[in-house]
Image (cartoon, grey):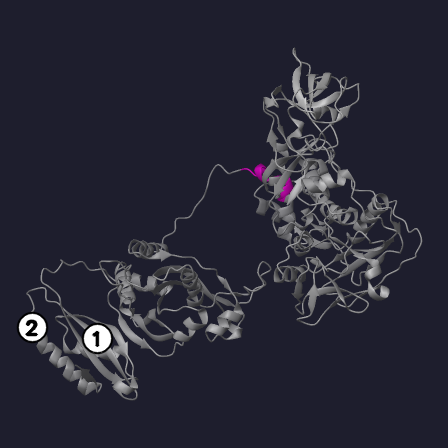
Amino acid sequence: MNVSLNWLKNYIALDLPVEEISRILTAIGLEVEGVKEVESIPGGLAGLVVGHVIECGQHPNADRLSLTKVDIGKEEPLQIVCGAPNVAAGQKVIVAKIGTTLYPTKGDSFKIRKGKIRGELSEGMICAEDEIGLGEGHDGIIVLSEEAKTGTAAADIYNLTSDQIFDIGLTPNRSDATSHLGVAKDLAAYLKINHEGDTYVKSPDVSSFSLSHETFPIEVVVENTASCPRFSGVTLSNVVVKASPDWMQKSLIAIGVRPINNVVDITNYVLHELGQPLHAYDADKIAGKKIIVKNLPADTIFKSLDDQDRKLDAEDLMICDGQSNAMCIGGVFGGADSGVTDLTKNIFLEAAHFEAGTIRRSSTRHLLRTDAAKVFEKGSDPNNTIYALKRAANLLVKHAEATIASELVDIYPKIIHPLSIHVRYEKINDLIGDSISKEAVHDILQAMEMEVKPVDDHSIKVLVPTNKADVIREVDVIEEILRIYGFNKVAIPDQISSTIQFTSFPEKNYVKNLLAEYLSSNGWNEMMGLSLMESRKAKDLIALEDEELVYINNTSNIHLDIMRPDMMISGLISVLHNQNYQIHDTRLYEYGSTYHKKENDSFTENPYLCLFLKGNKSPESWKNTAEKTELSDLQQTITSSIARIGLKNYMLAEVNDDERFSYAVDYKIHNNAVIRVGVIAQNILKKMGIKDAVYYAEIQIDKLVKAARKSKTQVSEINKFPVSRRDLALVIDKKREFADIVKIAKKVDKKILKEISLFDIYENEEHLGAGKKSYAVQFMFEDTTKTLRDSDIDKIMSKLTAEFESKIDAHIRK
């Protein structure tokens, strides 16, 4: 939000340096992100002086040029070639000296240089209005009065002004500071408490508002009072639409608002002055001389002011005419056919209070982040509408020759009163961490226009003005007190007390960091997805019970309406993003949490480490053909990762009840499923638009840490004898699990059979038979005392084969 220092000075006496004002604004919660100077004339007429033309004659080499001698108060006059038809000896003129940069009304800036024009030296330039940004005139040079003193700076002649603009990062909770008057009141409260003197705010006087004669009444009906608790308006006739006064245009331009005409500029001026959005309708275009505030059916087409056809949502609050034709999305944007034009003679001026959430959703839905919507979504003051109407009407009477042609319309069925909040003195000092006297507390609250009513010796009732929509609790009032009291006044204690705490080893963050370091050092990239997602998309991808979802009221983006229920979905969004940028070889990992609602309306948050593997094992090059990643590659990464924290003893159990995977296994440690690794189901990838297979692993961090605390790391000498590998392809019944194979194998040999892993799964009823599947199983053999012979391993493999055939009716594929 831009705030003009000159504008602020209309309401409050400020003689402090700009740096000090910036410090105070930041201290009271209106963080100044930058300050810039705005000049009424670009360049401030620097380098321009009053000159006296002492000679003027015909240029010897050009019929339309004059050769002049101009005194600018220096020892020697300047010779200047001038092409203006009205230049003459004896004139006082504006001269641009050599090196001066000019900022014309139209076009780019340029610098005056010493040079020759048609063979004659020219040492400057005699200026016209448009050449120095003073106007549009280019018929001739500017001729000043004879009283102008030679050599005087042009900036002194024109009494130029400059302004300082504060760029304030206004937070969503500061509904009271969306205007210059609101900022002035906050500044005044701070200055009253922290600076000597009685600083006060001078609000615009509206006492001159009066009805001339009721000639143009407009009836107003509000059907949706929940979304529009208050609707006020007034009709003005005989309006003359023209340019707004120069001072108003300069004020608007200074804060980045483009002037349009007097009617629109006045509504914008009052918005930024008082924080109350206004909207002006061409009263002659309001069918039936009636306004209806209502909701229209979903998918109704509305042509907005920017000439776009917008499809309305059933929740959009609309301002309609007597025939239910939409004229405006209430609080957001006007319509193409009801606005003020150069031909407008009568206007209906609206000042309303809309429910913040409704406006935010409509604004976001239609991507219309207007100044009015930004005010309403923070919470406008419901008791400011009439004052703003009177202020705007008075300005229209003065600057648009308007006549007030109706009584004030004010639909306000349920009056919103100041909120009464019980505040305890002890709680104030406890939260702030300083001892503030009761009198100081009262002074601060009254400086912020909050009425104080005593309750007892220990507490008070505080009546919070309706412009502070965010102040609803005792702690909010205490925050307001602290803002004005001053954060820097709270003493920092000389001593800091702490309690020594310890936790079981390994500590959770230690485990997370250890795993992250391992993955990052092995070519994996860490990502961070949003904890929010669209319920519609989540429920489309996987089966989710609506009662389990954690819905939120997300005013920043209404589509992201639930907390993340599943890590896979949010991670696949990142995989798709990489794919869209032609990054097909993906190794991503993420720490994050999922959120679920329980039956007793409590919530659970479960932390995970998730891995996503896709594409080739290594980039394709002239040396090698790219090889696709497999599930076993991800399993190897998981095995190596958990080994870093001392976990090696686990059981694999096949997963048959998780629709997210086409195949998956659980890593069970101490009989608890801690890790799930698998191939993401093709139907999910297809809905996401992901073309290649994606392998996914999710590690339950809390369970992993618990398992790591139970495990004992053993260190042994590196085996100096080689390891041997054998593979078997087993055709088994689909109901069988990999855990069955592991169990049988470990019974056959416990001495040299060190590792059993599954590296491929194949299903094809035509080749294998109905209800059958094929497992490709890897067996690793190792002996720490000798080199294994083929005969030793063959003997064990024969036993394994026989056991598999007899115990689980396996067929060995050869």
Q: Which part of the image, by quadrant, shows the C terminus? A: bottom left
Mark 2 crowd level (few <14, some 14–19, many ≥20, 10 Å Cα): few
Magenta region, main secondary structure: helix
* Percent x, y of residue 144: 77, 23
Residue at x-position 73% and y-position 59%: 336
Residue 529 image position (x, y, % from top left): 45, 59
In this orientation, does residue 436 appear?
no
What residue is pinned by disc 1?
A: 777
Horizontal relation, residue 637 to residue 297: left or right: left
Q: Which residue is mark 2?
A: 790
Q: Position of residue 208 (x, y in %)?
A: 88, 44
Residue 69 highlighted magenta (yes or no): no
Secondary structure beneath label 2: helix
The stretch of residues the image draws in magenta is 482-491
Secondary structure at numbered mark 1: strand
Front residue of this view, candidates 108 and 434: 108
